[in-house]
Amino acid sequence: MANREVSDTTSGSSAERTSSGFERTSSAFGANTNGFGLTASDVDRPSGAAAVLTDRPEQGDELGERNQVESTKELSLTGERPQENLNIIKELNNKSATAMPREFASSEFTLIDGADQQLSATGDTPTAKQEEQHDVARGDKRTGKPFDQSALAATTRDTTLDRSIERTKVGNTEFSVTRDADGKPTEFTDRSGTWRAQNDGETFVNTGDKDQPRFMRGTPTIDVEGNFSFKNSDFGTTQTHFRNGNSRTEIESSDGQRVSLERNSSGIATQIEDRTGTWTSSDGKNWRNETGATRSGSPSIDANGEYTFRDRTGKVTEKTESKELSEAKKLQQEISRKYGVEISQPGERLEEGATVQPAARELRALDDTLDRSKQMDMLSGKDGDKDRKPLKISFFGPDAKGTHGEGFGVYADDALGIFQNSRINPEGWLGLKGVGLHELVHHEQSKMSSDDWRGKNPGPEIEHLREAFGWKYHQKFGSVMLDKNGGMWSPTSRGNHDHEGGPSTSWVWVDGTKLQKGEKHTINGSEMAERAKVKQASEYNSSPYESHAEAASLLRHDPADLARRAPEVYKAVRDWDQTKINKVFGEGKMIRGINGKIVQDNAENRQARQEMERRFGI
C-alpha cells in the first residue's frame, strides 16, 4: 500500500513547488500577513480619479470650492474640511435631483475618522430615483431593499505595500478583501478565517488545517453597500452575505435558468426563485408565490451547485443543477467510458472517508493523466484473473480520515484515492497530475510478474530496475541504497522534509565502506541525494518501489526534467516504459514523446526526443 505524500522534483517554476503553496506567505504582506492592522492614520488618500488632493481651494473659500466641484468634480474628503466638503456634495447632489455619480458612492469615498466612524459620501435620505439608480449600479433590483447609506464598506490604501483592503462587517464577523496594485484579490477573510490566493489568482487556500488545507476557486467581492459575495468558479454558486445578516445563494443552470435561495439572519429560508416562479415564506416550510399558489417543503442549494426542493415527505419535487456541475458530471461519464475506470459518486463511504464531487477542472487534469497512461491495464488483478473490475478512482475532501488521509494520494487494492492537497493545483507535479501518475505507476507495478521490490528474489524485471536505480539487497537490512564510495544506507522514515518542502526519507549508514571520522551516520534526503551512487528522480525514495514510481511518473509528466535530474534513471525507466507501450500498441508504433504523452513513432518525434536527450548527455 502506498501513500504518496509529496516529492521534491519539479516541473516548471519553483513557486509551484513551495509546499504546494499551503503555507506560502507573501513578502508583500510584511509581518502582518492578514493585513488588517491599518488605522485611519495609515490612509494616505482615497484612491480613484474623483478624489484629487492637488490644487484644492484654500480653507474657507467655499464658493471657489463649489465652482471647482461643478466644473471638475474634484473635491477632497480628507484634510481640514471633510464635513464641510461632504455638505457641499450633498447640496450639489440635491440641486441636481439625481443620484450621485457611482464613484461618489463607492467604498473608496468612505471617510474613516479617528473614532472609526463612517460618514457616507451620499446624502442622508436618498430619493426614490436615487434608490433605483443604486440598485442598478449594484446589478441587483430583485431584493427590493432600500439602499442603506450607512452600510458602505471601508477601503484603506497602504502605499508602502501597494495594496488596498476592503472591509465590511456582518453581525460579529468581519469580511475583507485585500487587493494588489492591479486590483487582483490576493487574500480574503470570512467566517472560516483567512484565505490566500495561489499562483493562478483564482484558487484561495485556508491553512487552518495545515495537513489538509481547504480551498475554493472563484472571486471574492465587497459591493458598495458592504455586502460580501464569493462566486465559486468550480460549481457556479454565488453566495452573498448581506450586512443585515441575511444571505443568498444562487446558481445558473445549463439552460440559463437562474435559481436563488435567500435566508434570514437566523438561517431560515425566506425566498426562492426557480423555474416555477418566486416563492416567499416566513417559516422556511410553507410557501406562497406571486399568484397565490401554495406549497410546503424545504429548499436547498448545496456546495456543488445542486438545487432541490423536497416536500413534507422528503420527496424531491424540484431539482436543478448549475451549468458547472452539469459539465463536471458529463466529463466524469466520458472519462469512465474512454478509459474503462470507475469514478466514485459523491458521498460514498470508503476507508478514507466520504468521497466528494470533483470539479470539471480536476476531471480535465485526470483525463490528461489517464491519457498519458494509455499503455496501462486499468482493470483489477492480472490477465486471466476472474471477476476483474475497473480501477476505482475517488476524490476526498479535507475531512478524509483513516491511516492514509494525511498525504496527497493513495493506491491500494485496485483503488486510487486523490486527497485534498492534490486537488488544490490539479495541473502541477504536486497536484492531481503528478500524484495521479505516481499512484497509477503503483497500479502498473501490481501487474508485474512479481511485486517483491524489497526481497531477496524479486524476479529479473524488478532486479534490473533496482540495480539501475542504485539499490542493493542486504541480507540483514533488506533494500539499501549505495553511495558513491560503496557505503550502504537504509531508509528509516519519511518524517523529514526536503529543501523544496516535500517529505524526504531519512537514511542511516548500515554497511559497506566505512565512514570517515566526523561523517554523520544519519543523514536527510538532501544529503543522501548528494552521496547516492545513482542520482534519483526525487528525494521521496523510501524503497525501490517508490524510487521507481517517482521516476516513471516524472517521465510521463515531464521527460526533460527527469533527464536533467537523473540521466541514468531516465534511461532505465524510458526503456522499461517502452516495453509496456510496445506490448499494447505493437513494436515500432508509438513512443513516449518529449511532452510526456504517447505519440506516433515517426522520424519527427524520434528526432525531437534524441535532441532533448543530447542536451543532458544521454
Image (cartoon, rainbow, N blue to C red):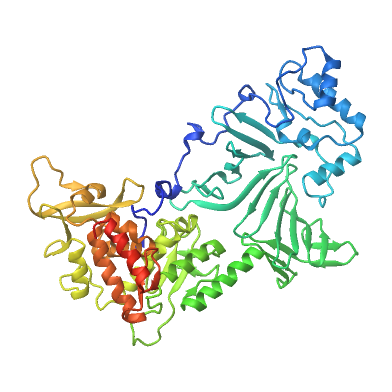
Q: Is residue 140 visible?
A: yes
Q: Position of residue 127 (x, y in %)?
A: 90, 37
Q: Position of residue 50 (x, y in %)?
A: 74, 30
Image quadrant in which the C terminus is located = bottom left
Q: Is residue 1 visible?
A: no
Q: Position of residue 143 (x, y in %)?
A: 81, 50
Is residue 384 depicted above or below 331 in this figure? below
The quarter of the displayed image where residue 595 is located: bottom left
Seen at 54% across and 36% down, the residue is: 34
Q: Is residue 531 left or right of residue 231?
A: left
Q: Nearer the viewer, residue 164 or 388?
A: 164
Image quadrant in which the N terminus is located = bottom left
Seen at 75% across and 43% down, the residue is: 244
Is residue 319 depicted above or below 489 in this figure? below
Q: Is residue 38 left or right of residue 575?
A: right
Q: Nearer the viewer, residue 233 or 39?
A: 233
Q: Position of residue 73 (x, y in %)?
A: 80, 28
Seen at 15% across and 61% down, the residue is: 477
